[in-house]
């Protein structure tokens, strides 16, 4: 397996797969990347058995071969080398020799046969989509995914088709729910759950304005860029009936400036060293007062002018849930809708009805 490759091409390929490589696994092979050399070029593959990535790099070579090499070490070496081209040469003793200028390295290789097989993907079945549209769906929902591994069916985003031209993405951790729709023409027979790590890898690859190939192939979600193929194994299980969580016929509505409530929540939350500690929101005619209390530090309160004409209502919320949602909203005004002190709050933008959040109240 002898070939030469441009250092920048190798570095970019290795950088793309770094977050996929599983360095904590009990399977040593998962900390390695599979290098497959053919007349078509070099393919570098990495997987943690849930998410897989294949990167294609053009290489001038008439030979074929494959070998597994430590992905992180190779990446660190490529970063430090100063030349423009790196040579790879296989040694019969089980080493791969790297050369770049006057620098020489010997890297231990593992048998390519030990590397897990990657699913075979029929790229022709994927659909061309806008990177902006996919990013919109992901950025509006991914923060609400549950991090509790015991709730495996909540550890990802739920993707389903609304009609021939519209996709809906939903995420919840049991305390909040994010729901968004976007015009994306993707055929889906039924809803699927894409795990959080896979969703974040998609987000990392996507660039607003670009076009990509995307689709559901068997038990995998697949995203293809010009040089990379991302394969994400879907979560098997049923997503909860989220429609039952979204309250209807809410009687009270508050309009508040996005930047004003964002700043107030940040300041009042400075005393909340415990992420699960709540803040009290007191709504009265034309006014919103936000309070927090920490017996070990002190108290904080701030008032905001809001558009509200209803009766006085006091509700406790986790401020982190509000902050996450506000960061995902772009309108100058935010609408808060609720019924009473014990009912969920619906948070949405002033104009975009396709994106809503449901936040459960908490006892203080």
Image: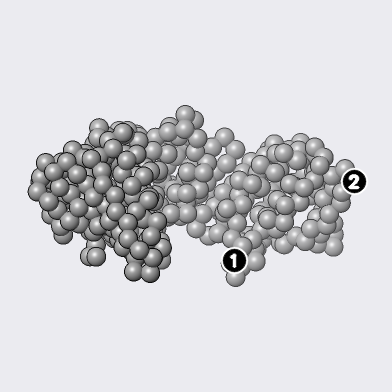
Residue receiving disc 1: 24
Residue receiving disc 2: 102
Work out whether residue 153 can be spotted: no
Rendered residue at 10%/45% (across/down)? 310
Q: Would you say 249 lies left or right of 61 here?
A: left
Q: Would you say 361 lies left or right of 321 here?
A: left
Q: Would you say 362 lies left or right of 265 here?
A: left
Q: Secondary structure at mark 2?
A: loop
Q: Would you say 22 lies left or right of 80 here?
A: left
Q: Tally the marks.
A: 2
Rendered residue at 17%/56% (across/down)? 314
Mark 2–mark 1 Cα distance, whole angstroms, equals 34 Å
- Figure check: 30 above or below 41: below
Mark 2 or mark 1, earlier in chain: 1
- Residue 40: image x %, image y %? 68, 38
Q: Secondary structure at mark 1?
A: loop
Q: Quick one: label 1, few (<14), some, or many (20+) residues within 10 Å?
A: few
The outermost residue toward the top is 209
- Residue 235: image x %, image y %? 39, 58
- Residue 132: image x %, image y %? 42, 33
């Amino acid at each position: 397996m002898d070939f030469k490759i441009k250092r920048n091409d190798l570095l970019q390929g290795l950088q793309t797969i770094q977050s996929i490589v599983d360095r904590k696994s009990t399977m040593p092979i998962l900390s390695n990347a599979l290098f497959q050399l053919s007349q078509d070029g070099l393919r570098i593959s990495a997987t943690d058995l849930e998410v897989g990535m294949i990167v294609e790099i053009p290489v001038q070579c008439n030979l074929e071969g494959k070998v597994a090499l430590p992905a992180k070490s190779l990446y660190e070496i490529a970063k430090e080398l100063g030349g423009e081209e790196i040579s790879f040469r296989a040694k019969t003793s089980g080493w791969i020799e790297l050369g770049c200028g006057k620098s020489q390295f010997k890297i231990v290789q593992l048998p390519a046969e030990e590397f897990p097989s990657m699913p075979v993907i029929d790229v022709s079945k994927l659909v061309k989509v806008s990177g902006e549209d996919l990013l919109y769906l992901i950025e509006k929902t991914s923060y609400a995914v549950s991090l509790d591994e015991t709730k495996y069916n909540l550890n990802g985003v739920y993707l389903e088709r609304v009609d021939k031209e519209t996709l809906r993405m939903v995420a919840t951790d049991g305390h909040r729910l994010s729901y968004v729709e976007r015009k994306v023409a993707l055929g889906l027979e039924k809803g699927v759950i894409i795990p959080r790590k896979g969703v974040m890898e998609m987000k990392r690859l996507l660039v607003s304005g670009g076009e990509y190939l995307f689709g559901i192939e068997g038990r995998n979600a697949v995203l293809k860029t010009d040089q990379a193929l991302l394969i994400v194994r879907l979560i098997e299980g049923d997503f909860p009936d989220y429609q039952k969580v979204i309250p209807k016929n809410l009687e009270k509505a508050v309009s508040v400036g996005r930047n004003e409530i964002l700043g107030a929540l940040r300041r009042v939350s400075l005393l909340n060293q415990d992420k699960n500690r709540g803040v009290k929101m007191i709504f009265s005619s034309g006014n919103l007062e936000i309070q927090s209390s920490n017996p070990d530090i002190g108290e904080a309160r701030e008032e905001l002018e809001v558009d509200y004409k209803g009766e006085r209502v006091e509700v406790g919320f986790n401020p982190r849930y509000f902050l996450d949602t506000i960061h995902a909203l772009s309108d100058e005004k935010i609408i808060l809708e609720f019924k009473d002190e014990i009912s969920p709050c619906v948070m949405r933008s002033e104009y975009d009805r396709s994106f809503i959040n449901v936040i459960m109240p908490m006892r203080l």
